[in-house]
């Protein structure tokens, strides 16, 4: 009697993960899509330890060795005990297998018009205070703290506001605002500057922003739209992964989602500077492009609308590939995307949509105009050719 299930690749991966080991790449490459999704589900539900305990019972050799000495002339008499013992060993395995089957069978991708899509909560953020404490911004009007002469208030689950109450000449104190995928948040700094922060972004900024000779903020990840309060004596500088943007008072967008970092100027005047001291001056309707791989900094005239539309509640595409379109939708609506064929990534789209529309409405429009078909499974969108 031999159980091959114990040799299954997905079981080996589960055991490695449960031991806090990085799974062997050759094992991961052998997993089917369903097995990967099962393992992701077990990790999400924090059930890796329970799953390991169950699959460990697949060690048939130990169970069989325990039973073997009792077999022989008393086979018939002991058969009920044997069956009970076998049932005790196999039942958890059957339950697990049944659970896997149920998970896979009941989570097959559903065509778009039959899918029920969970709405995305766009008003979420985490504030990390200077002492390391994290605060989930969920209250309608949360008075959070008063630090370095500055009061901090969360308003209507959409705006984090800093207001200077007095003079503070001490060292700058920094907070960090973390925006998860599928959300956005607005930040009002104590100098009057406002920042709209996009999905999957991190901005580090000074609480007492006027306490230093320059107003320095750090876009550690993602995208932000700045409307900077004018103060000629204190330049405002955005540090963004190898490119610094220096302004006195202006409106601009900084995008660091990829290794190509873009600063797009709406109004005013900015200086963009790279880590290797290249420098260019931008006028309105111009964009600075910094390639983090080559350290090259360049400038181009652009239509600013597609680059800043997100901050005004729109998503605008101008001859964008379907790959680019789905990347934006994935980021904003918090869905993963799986293309079933490489060639459909190159289909081009142009258009304008409401950023707060139901994603199902947007996918329907793309289906009708782009010759593609969508299906949904959990929070994953499958894209195939019609």
Image (tube, rainbow, N blue to C red):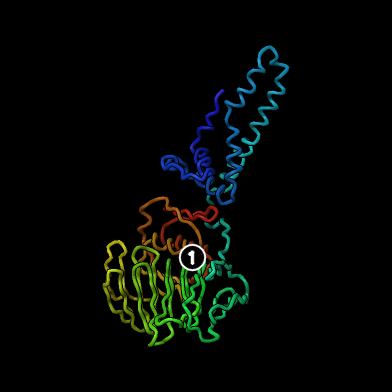
Does residue 75 appear in the picture of this structure? yes
- Residue 242, quarter of the rendered image: bottom left
- Answer above or below: position of 9 versus 384: above
Q: Residue, x 50% and y 83% (percent of image)?
A: 168
Q: Which residue is mark 1?
A: 332
Q: What count of labels does the image hold?
A: 1
Q: Nearer the viewer, residue 30 or 211?
A: 211
Q: Residue, x 53% and y 32% (percent of image)?
A: 6
- Answer above or below: position of 307 versus 6: below
Q: Residue, x 31% and y 81% (percent of image)?
A: 283
- Answer above or below: position of 43 versus 54: below
Q: Position of residue 381 (x, y in %)?
A: 49, 55
Q: Position of residue 202 (x, y in %)?
A: 46, 67
Q: Nearer the viewer, residue 91 or 71?
A: 71
Sort mark 1 into few (<14), some (14-19) or many (20+) by Cα contacts within 10 Å.
many
Q: Identify the residue at the far front of this view.
A: 170
Q: Position of residue 153 (x, y in %)?
A: 58, 78
Q: Position of residue 36 (x, y in %)?
A: 49, 45
Q: Residue, x 71% and y 23% (percent of image)?
A: 81
Q: Secondary structure at mark 1?
A: helix
Does residue 306 appear in the picture of this structure? no
- Residue 91, quarter of the rendered image: top right
In which quadrant of the rendered image does the N terminus lie?
top right
């Amino acid at each position: 009697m031999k159980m091959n299930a114990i040799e299954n690749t997905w079981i080996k991966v589960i055991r490695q993960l449960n031991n806090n080991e990085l799974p062997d790449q050759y094992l991961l490459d052998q997993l089917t899509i369903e097995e990967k999704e099962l393992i992701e589900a077990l990790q999400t539900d924090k059930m890796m330890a329970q799953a390991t305990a169950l699959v460990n019972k697949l060690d048939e050799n130990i169970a069989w060795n325990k039973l073997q000495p009792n077999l022989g002339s008393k086979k018939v008499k002991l058969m009920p005990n044997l069956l009970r013992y076998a049932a005790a060993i196999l039942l958890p395995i059957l339950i697990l297998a049944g659970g896997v089957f149920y998970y896979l069978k009941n989570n097959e991708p559903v065509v778009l018009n039959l899918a029920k899509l969970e709405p995305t909560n766009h008003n979420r953020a985490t504030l990390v205070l200077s002492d390391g404490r994290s605060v989930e911004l969920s209250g309608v009007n949360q008075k959070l703290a008063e630090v370095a002469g500055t009061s901090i208030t969360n308003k209507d689950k959409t705006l984090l506001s800093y207001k200077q109450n007095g003079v503070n000449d001490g060292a700058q104190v920094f907070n960090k605002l973390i925006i998860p995928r599928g959300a956005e948040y607005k930040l009002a700094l104590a100098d009057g500057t406002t920042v709209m922060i996009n999905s999957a972004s991190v901005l580090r900024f000074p609480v007492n922003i006027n306490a230093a000779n320059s107003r320095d903020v750090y876009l550690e990840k993602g995208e932000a739209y700045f409307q900077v309060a004018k103060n000629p004596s204190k330049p405002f500088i955005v540090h963004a992964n190898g490119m610094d943007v220096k302004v006195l008072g202006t409106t601009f967008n900084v995008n660091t989602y990829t290794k190509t970092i873009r600063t797009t100027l709406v109004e005013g005047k900015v200086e963009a500077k790279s880590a290797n001291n290249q420098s260019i001056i931008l006028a309105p309707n111009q964009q600075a492009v910094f390639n983090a791989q080559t350290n090259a900094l360049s400038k181009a005239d652009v239509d600013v609308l597609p680059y800043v539309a997100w901050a005004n509640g729109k998503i605008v595409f101008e001859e964008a590939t379907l790959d680019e379109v789905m990347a934006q939708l994935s980021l904003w609506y918090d869905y993963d995307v799986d293309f079933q064929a490489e060639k459909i990534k190159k289909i081009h789209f142009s258009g304008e949509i409401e950023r707060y529309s139901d994603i199902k409405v947007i996918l329907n429009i793309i289906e009708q105009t782009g010759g593609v078909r969508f299906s949904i499974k959990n929070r994953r969108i499958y894209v195939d050719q019609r």
